[in-house]
């Protein structure tokens, strides 16, 4: 029987011993300190763990930056602030974003499928996010260094 235990140092990938963020660890069982991993992530988006029915990405949003207005018709999303300050807007249509929240470290928001939403960096340091999608939204192993890389990947 395999034994899976959390480690308290760096990447935790069973094949590495590294102390830097690694990319997609799914779909095997895996344990990590998400806040530490998010702080180490320097990419706009990194797929951290992708399984058959769930995915976690880590995001790094620069000062004055944003994720960008989006809507996932068949995907629920959970977004947690791991560091920094966020301003989240949501609504049923992109012309009517009637909900706005200010989030700080440890706060989270649940975004039901079909809801338009955007997350902006509302602080003076990089915004560090973890985001869970169910089902997965991005291909296994996705790494987008910048928002521009992410936008090009959507077309």
Image: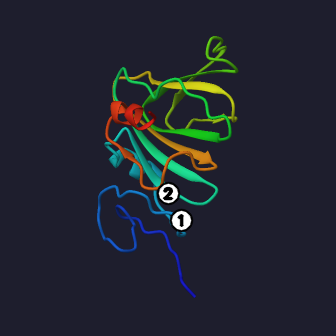
Residue 126 in sight: no
Q: In the image, residue 140 lies at what x, y percent? A: 47, 55
Q: Secondary structure at mark 2?
A: strand
Q: Quadrant of the N terminus?
A: bottom right
Spot occupied by residue 60 in the image (x, y as percentages of width and height)? 38, 37
Taking depth in this image into account, of 19 and 131 the one nearest to the observer is 131
Considering every residue shown, the one lying at the far bottom of the view is: 1
Q: Is residue 93 left or right of residue 49?
A: right
Between discs 2 and 1, the one toward the N terminus: 1
Q: Residue 49 got which mark?
A: 2
Q: Give the number of callouts.
A: 2
- Image quadrant assignment for residue 153: top left
Up-down: is 89 above or below 152? above
Circle 1 — which element? Answer: loop
Q: Quadrant of the C terminus?
A: top left
In-image side of 30 versus 45 (left or right): right
Q: Going 69% across and 30% down the picture, which residue do you hit?
A: 114
Can you identify the residue that label 1 sits on? 27
Which of the pair 98/33 is nearer the observer? 98
Left or right: residue 72 versus residue 155 is: right
Q: State the image coordinates of residue 44 (x, y, percent, origin top left).
A: 37, 38
Q: Residue furthest front?
A: 155
For label 2, the crowd category at 10 Å Cα-Cα, with few meaning under 14, some 14 to 19 and many 20 or more, is many
Depth check, front residue: 142 or 31: 142
Q: Position of residue 93 (x, y in %)?
A: 67, 18
Q: Judge whether 21 appears above or below 9 on screen.
A: above
Residue depicted at x 36% and y 74%:
15
User: Looking at the image, what colour scheme do you see?
Assistant: rainbow
């Amino acid at each position: 029987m395999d034994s899976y235990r959390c480690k308290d140092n760096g990447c935790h990938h069973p094949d590495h011993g590294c102390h830097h963020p690694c990319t997609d660890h799914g779909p095997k069982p895996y344990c990590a300190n998400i806040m530490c991993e998010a702080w180490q992530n320097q990419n706009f988006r990194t797929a951290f763990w992708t399984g058959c029915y769930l995915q976690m990405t880590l995001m790094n949003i620069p000062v004055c930056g944003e994720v960008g207005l989006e809507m996932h018709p068949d995907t629920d999303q959970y977004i947690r602030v791991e560091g920094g300050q966020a301003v989240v807007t949501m609504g049923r249509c992109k012309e009517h974003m009637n909900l706005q929240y200010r989030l700080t470290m440890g706060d989270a928001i649940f975004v039901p499928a079909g809801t338009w939403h955007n997350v902006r960096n509302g602080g003076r340091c990089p915004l560090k996010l973890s985001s869970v999608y169910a089902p997965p939204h991005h291909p296994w192993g996705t790494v987008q260094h910048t928002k521009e890389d992410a936008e090009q990947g959507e077309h």
